[in-house]
Amino acid sequence: MNALAFILASAEGAEEHSKTAFYVAGGVLAAWAVLVSLVGISRPSFPGSKAAARTMMLLTALLVAGVMSTAVITA
């Protein structure tokens, strides 16, 4: 029975993917969120225009999509 458990454990370990991309993408998204929060708290008129707001929303959506895709790929 120990041999079967060893074989199954070896097979599971071989299929595991590196989660480094997910950790990096998640860290970038978290840093972005903190940066936007700090700038938003310190400047009442942030963002200055509708175009800047849309650009920030697009960048945030791209970062979230990147984190989600790396989560699925490395799962």
Image (cartoon, rainbow, N blue to C red):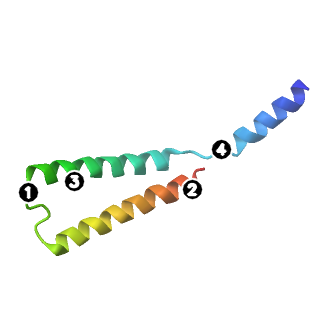
Helix, strand or loop under label 3:
helix
Of labels 4 and 1, earlier in sequence is: 4
Crowding at mark 4 (Cα within 10 Å: few <14, some 14-19, many 20+): few
Q: Report the residue marked by disc 4.
A: 16
Q: CA distance from mark 2 to mark 4?
A: 13 Å
The correct choice, above or below, for 24 with respect to 13 in the image is: below
The correct choice, above or below, for 48 with respect to 25 in the image is: below
Crowding at mark 1 (Cα within 10 Å: few <14, some 14-19, many 20+): few
> Which residue reaches farthest right?
1
Crowding at mark 2 (Cα within 10 Å: few <14, some 14-19, many 20+): few
Of labels 1 and 3, earlier in sequence is: 3
Q: Report the residue marked by disc 2.
A: 72
Of labels 2 and 3, earlier in sequence is: 3
Residue 58 placement (x, y as % from top left): 31, 69
Residue 65 placement (x, y as % from top left): 44, 62
The correct choice, above or below, for 49 with respect to 24 in the image is: below
Q: Amino acid at mark 1?
A: Pro
Q: Amino acid at mark 2?
A: Val
* Horizontal side of residue 19 vs 36, given as left or right: right
Q: Report the residue marked by disc 1.
A: 44
Q: CA distance from mark 2 to mark 3?
A: 26 Å
Q: Amino acid at mark 4?
A: Glu
Q: Amino acid at mark 3?
A: Val
Q: CA distance from mark 1 to mark 3?
A: 12 Å
